Amino acid sequence: MSVTIKDIAKLSGVGISTVSRVLNGSGFASPVTKQKVMAAVHELNYIPNNNARNLKRTQTKTIAVLVKSITNPFFQKMIHTIEQKTMLRGYCLELRNVNSNGQEMLIAQQEVMDKNLCGIILMGGGFEYTEEDFKHLGVPCVLLTVSADDKVNKDLYSSVIIDDEAENFKATDYLIKLGHKRIGCIYNAYGQLKTPNTLRFEGYKRALLENGIPFDPLLVSSFNTSQSGYEFGFNMMKNLMMRNKDMTAVVAMADIMAVGAAKAILSEGLRIPEDISVIGFDGIEVAEYYSPALDTISQPAEQMAVSAIDALFAMMQGEKTSHIVYEAVLLKRGSCIGLTNHS
Amino acid sequence: MSVTIKDIAKLSGVGISTVSRVLNGSGFASPVTKQKVMAAVHELNYIPNNNARNLKRTQTKTIAVLVKSITNPFFQKMIHTIEQKTMLRGYCLELRNVNSNGQEMLIAQQEVMDKNLCGIILMGGGFEYTEEDFKHLGVPCVLLTVSADDKVNKDLYSSVIIDDEAENFKATDYLIKLGHKRIGCIYNAYGQLKTPNTLRFEGYKRALLENGIPFDPLLVSSFNTSQSGYEFGFNMMKNLMMRNKDMTAVVAMADIMAVGAAKAILSEGLRIPEDISVIGFDGIEVAEYYSPALDTISQPAEQMAVSAIDALFAMMQGEKTSHIVYEAVLLKRGSCIGLTNHS
């Protein structure tokens, strides 16, 4: 027998109308009451009736974007596109930053309730979402740049991603084909989580493996950090250069890290690409304005943002979920050259 | 005789309780009703009783930051600090982007009503706020990086700024003292508005004047644009170089523009600082990671953000408004040298 709002009221010890107010985020409910109700919702695994709730919600017309690492300029570009498209459709956009240790799904659930959201887009973070996460959310949800575990029912959410593993295989393989064998790798490891960065690291290792180059942990600099990408890239590159005098190239798993790494190389009096080739990931503007301009794996940020917002509005109109994997592009701007041209 | 909620109800043709709901943002009111009430509020110049409203509002505990030009990394740094401090005090932060043509004060007034805000911080934009703006807002307001016109009663708002005119005088004067006379100037002119950029431009002109150097409009590149700072700086510098073969230095009124300008110089095969000296403004991270690292007027972003949030919470507790002008620092990183050292 399915759980109803009456069961929630009984378990949490408050009236049915109070439960309704809490679940719909309308009218007053004290923080303590909210907590009681939400505890009961979670305990009974209650799934709100979305149709009824969405009907009510059409009045507020607000959707939200939750972003982890909002300071990465790559996300800024996407947010701008999402904002434009949202306004063109007559909706408001709530922008919410989640710091790197934050529980984005819990925050999302709270936002949906507090703000009567019609739908939500989650950007950044990891690939760790569960079926329960989406059920508790209770409104259409699109994951952008990340996705859920393969085991999760794909009808519960939409996703717009690139194949991070394959794309960074591409970057590493490109350097190997240029003759490089001692290739440094810089990435941000978030504990044991599966993230875009850890997937890109898998691509780096597979490229080495398939080209018969032994993996050397000394060539890897990673750390679980909330430092900015620039500072992190700079420090990790300093480390790599100290440990590996024979390194001729480096793969950085975000352009902001590549900029920091480039600065570390230039500040040692070395040249790019004559002494060390550099490739980044993402395709942010500043990597192109850097001198030299940095090669990168460029994600189609604007297209991805448009697809995410399209998927969300489709779901809000009762259409099916969708799952899109975009292809990224290897941009050659001159910061990588063949090993035989190194001086 | 002061205007009361009864007068609003009478003029807008709705009940007193409806007016109360609209003004407090609690419960349901149709968009049409809201509009009627707000029209009456504006017409009668009604000033809500803040103490009563704030009492009610302590339950929601949300403050908001409205930002113009959210993509400028300079603002990102401040937002991060504001977010941390807000959470530490047990409040939620709403982050709202306003695009460069947006009417931030109207949006602020709407947000206050829709979201039961306890207070609001406005960043970016111009210096064009009026007394009515703050009265209609009805909650404590802090202006950060901008302020209101001098004629506006200073008890109505708090502000945290730098002296943009004096600081860019400092930058220009520094170049002049290094022997430069043909100094380019890049800034973003937003129509006829008074903004930090236009104030910095005044400082540039005064430095020339006080040093007996004639102002030459050919050395100025400005435009009312919503292009990103990097692209804008790059294009404006290309312009300046084409028109002025004798230019030996450039002042860019934001670091993102300075990065674009630096790229334009380097892409022409010229060197920094040997051929052209470059100085920016703001003190963002990427200007330091650029190669060469760029000189700048560095604003104390974190301190300014802390002061803004402190001022807001003070006002929310019934304390007086405050108006702080911080001093910025000229950071010499090697992108400007004496004219006699130019080659």
Image: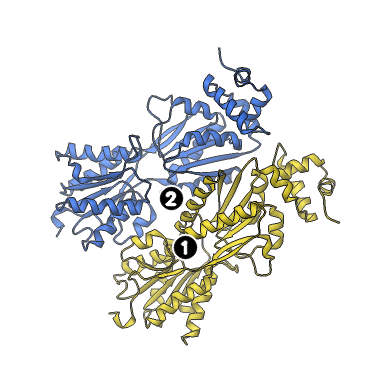
Chain colours: A yellow, B blue
* Image quadrant assignment for residue A14: top right
Q: Mark 1 points at which residue?
A: A300
* Mark pair 1, 2: CA separation: 18 Å
Could you tell me which quadrant the N terminus of chain A lies in?
bottom right
> Left of B119 or right of it: where is B249?
left
Residue B172 sits in quarter: top left
Q: Mark 2 points at which residue?
A: B71
Q: Locate the C terminus of chain A and report the quarter of the image it occupies.
A: bottom left
In percent of width and height, residue B105 lies at 48, 34
Residue, far bottom: A212
Amino acid type indicated by mark 2: Thr
> In the figure, is residue B108 to the left or right of A58?
left
Crowding at mark 1 (Cα within 10 Å: few <14, some 14-19, many 20+):
some
Q: In this view, does A42 lie to the left or right of A166?
A: right
In this view, which residue lies farthest toward the top?
B1
SS at circle 1: loop
> A119 above or below A206?
above
Residue found at x 27% / y 50%: B236
Q: Which of A126 and B44 is in front in this view?
A: B44
What's the chain of the residue with tag 2? B
Judging depth in this view, the residue of A209 and A141 nearest the camera is A141
In the rendering, at what x and y percent does residue B300 appear?
Answer: 39, 45
Identify the element where label 2 is drawn.
loop
Q: Picture quarter containing residue A150?
A: bottom right
Residue name at image x 51 percent, y 36 percent: B107
Residue toward you, A223 or A161: A161
Instruction: Name the amino acid, label 1.
Output: Pro
Q: Which of marks 1 and 2 is in front?
A: 1
